[in-house]
């Protein structure tokens, strides 16, 4: 290992060829991850369709991402220690109920994102996810995959899933496309973009009937409009503070809602109905499991799919990991605000709201902004910090201004 970076870190392989391979390994591994994640979100695995090819793609993704992490990523010793610490906490929290599925590959993608040109991953994500959505929906319309899921209904009416594992999974996929489009088109948003984005929110609300995904979309649009047309809003300390406190406030509001909920009270019953029975489950999870240091596996069939990222981590994996999650999201928001990364800030605000009622916000296959986490964790300088909406050099210029 040779330090050729004037104190910015060590990398096992250096030189122009190594730089080229670093980019290709990350982009290739990330694209294969998107394919594998999208496949796992559909009903194709339940029909044992295409399992062997997808498993091969999975192994190729692991090889590319591990190669990027070990051979082509530069770390200072404190950065390396921080990465080891956070992965160690995550693995400790998973001990005894680790699932070999999308999650381990997602962790590799997040680690490999350090030193990667993240703005180059948005277009491939849009292409892969849009194509996968179209193919899955087409198979459902053709009758190859189920259009609806038995027992998943709203007021007795089955909610269409179009071949996905759940209607909310379909909505999360559309939400991911929605967020990626905002990241890609922020500076060039026109009336056609706004109309298309509003149509996507209406589709998610009316067809799969996913209220929280639609609300998150509208929140992103509102934040995007505010940041775009009120150019200096992030120059106000109060606005920056409110953005940075959003993850903590959302987590505390989730905990308070579950703690204060009282079944049989007209107001709480109405709010619980609007949240699709989530408030009752938040309360039940708190009563059944409570807050512990390292958490307790959520084995109760009713609570297993607790649809709140913060509470699921708090009760299932413990207060230590819950503080880490809130801390990382706060650190990420702080960096986005400091760099005046308006598209990332708007998307992260919407995804934070979405996390209050859907755990899917924790997956980079839906939430691309999570790719920035490792750069925050490692303390990458502003001038070298990669964003999704623009190259690192542009980000540095924005922060200086």
Image (cartoon, helix red, strand yellow):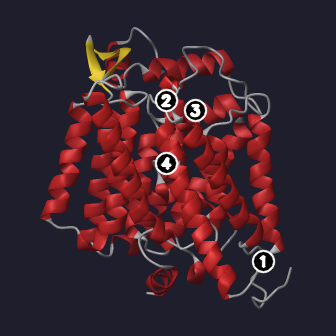
Does residue 236 appear left or right of residue 304 in this picture?
left
Name the front one of labels 1 and 2: 1
Q: Position of residue 242 (x, y in %)?
A: 45, 58
Between discs 1 and 2, the one toward the N terminus: 1
Q: Residue furthest top?
A: 264
Q: Quadrant of residue 122?
A: bottom left
Does residue 38 appear left or right of residue 56 in this picture?
left
- Where does label 3 land, which residue? 311
State the CA–CA distance, disc 4 to disc 1. 29 Å
| Local crowd size for mark 3, using a 10 Å CA cut-off: few (<14), some (14–19), many (≥20) | many
Q: Quadrant of the C terminus?
A: bottom left
Q: Is residue 356 above or below residue 324?
A: above
| Local crowd size for mark 1, using a 10 Å CA cut-off: few (<14), some (14–19), many (≥20) | many
Q: Which mark is residue 11?
A: 1
Does residue 234 appear left or right of residue 191 in this picture?
right
Q: The residue tagged with tag 2: helix, strand or loop?
A: loop
- Where does label 2 land, which residue? 307
State the CA–CA distance, disc 2 to disc 4. 24 Å
Q: Which mark is residue 35?
A: 4
Q: Position of residue 373 (x, y in %)?
A: 60, 60
């Amino acid at each position: 290992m040779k330090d050729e970076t004037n104190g910015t870190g060590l990398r096992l392989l250096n030189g122009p060829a190594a730089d080229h391979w670093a980019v290709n390994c990350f982009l290739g591994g990330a694209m294969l991850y998107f394919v594998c994640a999208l496949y796992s979100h559909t009903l194709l695995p339940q029909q044992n369709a295409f399992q062997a090819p997808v498993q091969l793609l999975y192994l190729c993704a692991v090889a590319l991402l591990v190669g990027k992490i070990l051979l082509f990523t530069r770390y200072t010793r404190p950065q390396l220690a921080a990465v080891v610490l956070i992965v160690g906490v995550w693995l400790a929290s998973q001990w005894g109920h680790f699932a070999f599925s999308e999650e381990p590959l997602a962790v590799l993608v997040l680690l490999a994102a350090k030193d990667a040109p993240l703005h180059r991953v948005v277009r491939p994500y849009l292409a892969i996810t849009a194509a996968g959505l179209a193919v899955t929906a087409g198979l459902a319309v053709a009758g190859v995959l189920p259009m609806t899921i038995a027992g998943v209904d709203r007021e007795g009416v089955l909610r269409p899933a179009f071949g996905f594992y759940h209607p909310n999974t379909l909505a999360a996929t559309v939400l991911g496309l929605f967020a990626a489009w905002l990241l890609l088109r922020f500076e060039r948003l026109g009336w056609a973009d706004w109309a298309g984005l509003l149509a996507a929110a209406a589709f998610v609300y009316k067809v799969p009937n996913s209220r929280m995904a639609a609300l998150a979309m509208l929140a992103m649009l509102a934040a995007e409009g505010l940041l775009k047309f009120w150019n200096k809003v992030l120059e106000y300390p109060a606005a920056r503070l409110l953005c940075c406190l959003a993850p903590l406030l959302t987590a505390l509001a989730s905990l308070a809602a579950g703690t204060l909920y009282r079944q049989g009270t007209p107001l709480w019953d109405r709010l619980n109905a609007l949240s699709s029975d989530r408030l009752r489950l938040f309360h039940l999870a708190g009563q059944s499991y409570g807050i512990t240091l390292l958490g307790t596996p959520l084995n109760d069939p009713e609570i297993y799919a607790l649809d709140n990222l913060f509470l699921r981590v708090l009760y299932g994996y413990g207060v230590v990991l819950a503080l880490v999650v809130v801390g990382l999201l706060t650190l990420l928001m702080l960096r986005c605000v400091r760099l005046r990364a308006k598209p990332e800030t708007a998307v992260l605000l919407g995804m934070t709201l979405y996390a209050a009622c859907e755990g899917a916000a924790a997956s980079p296959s839906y939430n691309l902004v999570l790719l920035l986490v490792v750069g925050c964790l490692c303390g990458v300088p502003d001038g070298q910090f990669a964003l999704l909406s623009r190259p690192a050099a542009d980000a540095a210029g924005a922060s200086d201004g």
